[in-house]
Image (cartoon, rainbow, N blue to C red):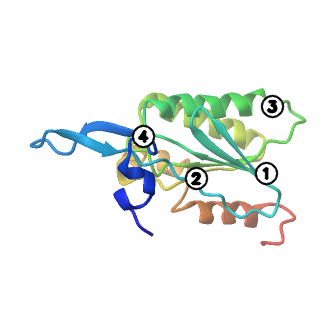
Amino acid sequence: MVEGPRACASWGSRTGTPWSRRPVSKNQRTRTVPRVPRQVMMLPHRAAQTRIEVHGMAIDWSDNIVIANLADEPALSDELSMICERIESASETDPIPHAVLDFHEVSYVNSSNIAQLLRLRKNLDARGRQLILSGVSDEVMSVLVVTGLNKVFEFSPDLITAIASIQIAEPGSDGA
């Protein structure tokens, strides 16, 4: 796969991909650098699937699994609160999905983010659903280890493994 300026014909013009001015390093001046669009991975599920775009956060739905591709702060707080509100607003009789949070773009979590994650885990656990944190960076994992939360949350190295572990653990699942 070709990456960088040759990945797309519109990279050479300012009409295609959004451009930003940001420093390349401390010793260099700012230069125009293309901002790479976020990629959304559509994963195979046994159930039908649709994709919803909410405030820039991609959410992939199946009948019983939601995958949220989280962005770094300041959007992380908003995205986590939106997921928490959705789970909390469901009535006791409404089925809620398992949640997989993709942290591969997140480089830092603060105490507010941790509180939101704990609240989300508590609500999902009360309804017999799983919360799996996927693609957690070393920086974020170090915060979770120092706080002892690495024993509270379930982790997965990638989205495929997270989905497979949910499907295997699902009662009545044939493991496929």
Q: Position of residue 154 (x, y in %)?
A: 57, 54
Q: Secondary structure at mark 3?
A: loop
Q: Position of residue 173 (x, y in %)?
A: 83, 66
State the residue in front, 74 or 64.
74
Q: Earlier in the sequence, mark 1 or mark 2?
A: 2
Q: Earlier in the sequence, mark 4 or mark 3?
A: 4
What's under tag 4, amino acid-wise?
Pro
What's under tag 2, amino acid-wise?
Val
The residue that disc 3 covers is 90
What's under tag 1, amino acid-wise?
Asn
Image disc number at residue 40: 2
Taking the view exactly as shown, the residue that stands out farthest to the left is: 27
* Mark 2 neighbour density, 10 Å: few (under 14) some (14–19) many (20 or more): few
Give the number of the mark in front: 4 or 3. 4
Give the number of the mark in front: 4 or 1. 4
Residue at 49%, 56% in the rendered image? 135
* Mark 4 neighbour density, 10 Å: few (under 14) some (14–19) many (20 or more): few
Vertical placement of residue 172 versus 101, above or below: below
State the residue in front, 51 or 125.
51
Residue at 68%, 66% in the rendered image? 164
Give the number of the mark in front: 2 or 3. 2
The residue that disc 4 covers is 18
